[in-house]
Amino acid sequence: MHIEQLPQVESHYCRSSSSREYLDTDLSISKLYDMYVKWCEERGAEVVRKHIYTSIFNQEYNTRISFVKPKKDRCDMCEKFRLKGKEKSLNEEDRQLYHAHRVAVENSRVEKKKDKETEDVIISFDLEKALTLPKADISNSFYKRKLSCYNLTGHLHKDKTAYCCLWTEAMCGRKGNDIPSAIVKILKNIVIEHPSTKRIILWSDSCIPQNKNSIMSLALKTFMESHPFVESIIQKFSEKGHSCVQEVDYIHSCIEKALKPSEVFSPLGLVRHLKKMRRHGKVIVIQMRRDDFFFIFRVLQNI
């Protein structure tokens, strides 16, 4: 079947809770059908009508393949409370859990606001969904396995600078060892720009595999040992399901808008587009090298 010839990728946001995979975001059912017609003509195969093709896709593939990669904007806890409320099945334990959850959300918001009023260096960071290359409106490219590029974005509150730290899957992935390597690279650039830095506060979501783990702690400790003028680094996390890194979300939105009308064929082309991106504040693009990734797992095994 034509649909099965198209490479799919897993979700950035729901990898642990869903087996659904996604087609290239530049595709649609209409574009897919046009490609199918050309595919059949090249093979001398009979072409079915569009409504039949659409029906087959919806009935046989739509439960495991989709065009749009969803960002889970709805909090699981809030959604559970809302649905139980509609069904009138809430009990006292549910109400207490939800109240504690909402208090934690508000506390995170207030805490970050207070941090911004201090002289500390406040950095928000998050990993953008994978950017796949080449990005071009060429039908043959949709049948090829694309290269995944990763962008860990940091936002420095002091001067509104965006730091885009880039690498490809050919170099490393997006596991526990890779994210700490990228955040350390961003920190090294920040202390060069701001040599008077003494106290750093890092804000991120509470994703345990990427941000909230012993590997990240050891990476930050290693950074401080090599930069003794930095007196402290404090990690703070948003309540699960409620992002407190809206500054980074905005940068990712700017990147998406900048890339949407563009054709990008290589990681170098991606770097050029990001450097030209329009936003309020400077954009610094950092290209990771292979020796920038340190293997924290090996260090942990010796502790």
Image (spheres, rainbow, N blue to C red):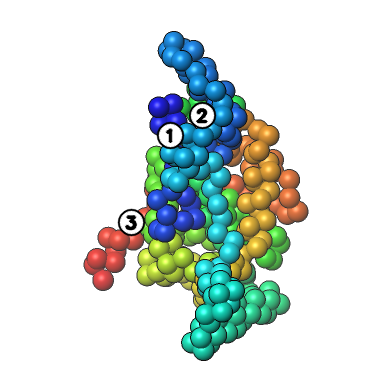
Q: Residue at x 58, y 50 (%)?
A: 164
Which residue position holds label 1?
7
**Mark 1 and mark 2: span between their CA atoms?**
18 Å
The answer to which of marks 1 and 3 sits earlier in the sequence is 1
Left or right placement of residue 289 versus residue 239 in this view: left
Left or right placement of residue 235 versus residue 252 in this view: left
Q: Position of residue 220 (x, y in %)?
A: 45, 67
Residue 195 shows in the view: no
Q: Residue at x 27, y 60 (%)?
A: 298
Q: Position of residue 160 (x, y in %)?
A: 70, 60
Q: Residue at x 71, y 62 (%)?
A: 159
- The disc placed on residue 53 is 2
For label 1, the crowd category at 10 Å Cα-Cα, with few meaning under 14, some 14 to 19 and many 20 or more, is some
Which residue position holds label 3?
295
The answer to which of marks 2 and 3 sits earlier in the sequence is 2
Q: Viewer-nearest of labels 2 and 3? A: 2
